[in-house]
Every structure is written in structure tokens, then in C-alpha cells.
Amino acid sequence: MDKSLWIEGVSDAIGFVGGALLGFWAGRLLGLDIFSTGYNNASIAGIVLVGLGGGLGLQLARRWRANKKQAGKD
């Protein structure tokens, strides 16, 4: 298995899960519970924060890899 694919997969997973957890805890601090019964506005807003956090974490992981690759070429 190619080492670069391994690094890509692991960094994507860490970025996504880390960002989703940050979004979850930011929602909890704001009083948004994604696990509340039913889909009220607070739970939907919490779910949106988790999704945004996961997406931003993934993008940060990809930018980190791109910067690392660019630094290696210089």
C-alpha cells in the first residue's frame, strides 16, 4: 500500500472527526442537542454545526497536506 494514500486517509478521517466533534461541542455550549427527541430547531441547528465542523475539518486536513507537499518541493 502506498504511504501517501495511508496519510491521506488518516488525515482526512482525523480532520473530519475532529471537526465534527468541535461542531458538536460548540452546539452543546450553545444549548443545541442533536440527540433530543424529535426534530426541533435546536436539534437541526446542532446537526448543521456537526456537518459544518466535519466539512471544515476535512478541508483543513487537505490544506495541511497540500502545504506539506508544497513545502517538500521547495
Image: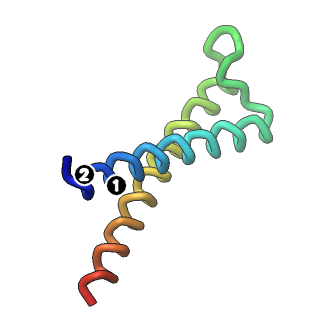
How would you rate the neighbour count of disc 1 (Cα within 10 Å): few for under 14, some for 14-19, many for 20 or more? few
Depth check: give the residue in front, 1 or 25. Answer: 1
At mark 2, the secondary structure is: helix
Percent x, y for residue 74? 27, 90
Residue pictured at 29% horizontal, 74% vertical: 69
Query: Given contact means CB atoms under 8 Å apart, are the residues at marks 2 and 1 in contact?
Result: yes
Going by the image, does 11 lie left or right of 73?
right
70 w.r.t. 48: above or below: below
How would you rate the neighbour count of disc 2 (Cα within 10 Å): few for under 14, some for 14-19, many for 20 or more? few
Residue extending furthest toward the bottom? 74
Q: Which residue is mark 2?
A: 5
Residue extending furthest toward the top? 37
Percent x, y for residue 57? 49, 52
At mark 1, the secondary structure is: helix
Residue pictured at 69% horizontal, 9% vertical: 37
Amino acid, disc 1: Ile
Residue pictured at 43% horizontal, 43% vertical: 13
Residue pictured at 34% horizontal, 54% vertical: 7
The image quadrant of residue 26 is: top right
Percent x, y for residue 47? 57, 30
Q: Which residue is mark 1?
A: 7
10 w.r.t. 44: above or below: below
Instruction: Tell me how far mark 2 sits from mark 1, CA to CA.
Output: 5 Å
Q: How many marks?
A: 2
